[in-house]
Image (cartoon, grey):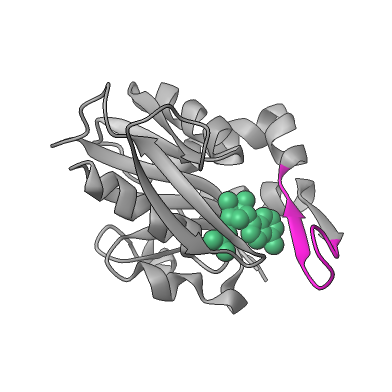
């Protein structure tokens, strides 16, 4: 299995898209480079390690271009802790925007906007600055590496909206379809470059 899917207001039907050949290529590059690690970080979790994709020059370029194509008319790219930082910064340079790091709880000085949520393994909190930068009115593209249960992406969307931003779309490299993370993201477009 493994193909690009898009849903929501910005999504197109991949089957009717003339770029399908190029998109299959994106999925093939991800599939060939990613690493599967059983029972990490806990027994029963099949960890999808995208480190080799990001460390490969073609892998990084292909993934960055595909993510940047999701919503080109934006003012800011937001990347989620931690691999989303790398991808978000790369996408931002492609789009000519700045990048906002959506950080794990406790890393940013106050004041912050904070949102707690359930993970595939455990719970977590995400934060963005509530001061020092103006998010109100900005059109934002949200980036992360993996969509699993959807709590992380949903919390980041909430945070950006708390700050007054408009989330134009969200994009991940890899989606674990069986975990049905999309169910938590019904009000935002989500593009996955590769689905397992
Ligand atoms: P979730 O909130 O369940 O959608 O989890 C998504 C976040 O947790 C992403 O930032 C991923 O980096 C990480 N994550 C969750 N499950 C996995 C997995 N099976 N493999 C790799 N990363 C994962």
Residue 37 % position (x, y)? 84, 57
Instruction: Give 81 or 3, whichever is nearer the viewer.
Output: 81
* Res 24 visible: no
Q: Is residue 45 magenta?
A: yes
- Image coordinates of residue 47 in percent, x first then y, are 76, 59
> Is residue 196 toward the left or the right of residue 142 in the image?
right
**What predominant SS class does the magenta segment belong to?**
loop
Q: Quadrant of residue 78?
A: top left
Q: Residue at x 67, y 36 (%)?
A: 59
Q: Is residue 105 magenta?
A: no
* Magenta stretch, residue numbers: 38-50
Q: Quarter for ligand 1? A: bottom right
**Residue 151 position within the rendered picture, expressed as x and y whole percent measured from the top left:** 48, 63
**Residue 172 visible in this rendered orientation of the protein:** yes
Counting from the top left corner in percent of width and height, residue 13 is at 37, 67
The residue positioned 28% from the left and 40% from the top of the image is 140
> Which picture quadrant has residue 41?
bottom right
């Amino acid at each position: 299995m493994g193909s690009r899917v898009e849903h929501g207001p910005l999504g197109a039907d991949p089957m009717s898209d003339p770029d399908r050949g190029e998109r299959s290529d994106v999925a093939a590059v991800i599939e060939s480079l990613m690493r599967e690690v059983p029972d990490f970080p806990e027994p029963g979790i099949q960890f999808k390690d995208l480190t080799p994709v990001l460390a490969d020059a073609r892998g990084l370029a292909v993934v960055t271009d595909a993510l940047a194509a999701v919503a080109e008319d934006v003012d800011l790219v937001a990347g989620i802790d931690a691999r989303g930082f790398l991808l978000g910064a790369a996408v931002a340079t492609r789009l000519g925007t700045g990048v906002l790091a959506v950080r794990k709880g406790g890393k940013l000085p106050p004041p912050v906007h904070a949102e707690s949520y359930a993970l595939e393994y455990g719970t977590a909190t995400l934060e963005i600055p509530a001061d020092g930068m103006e998010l109100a009115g900005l059109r934002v593209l949200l980036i992360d590496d993996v969509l699993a249960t959807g709590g992380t992406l949903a919390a980041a969307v909430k945070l950006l909206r708390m700050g007054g931003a408009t989330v134009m779309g969200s994009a991940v490299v890899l989606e674990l379809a069986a975990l049905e993370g999309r169910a938590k993201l019904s009000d935002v477009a989500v593009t996955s470059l590769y689905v397992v």
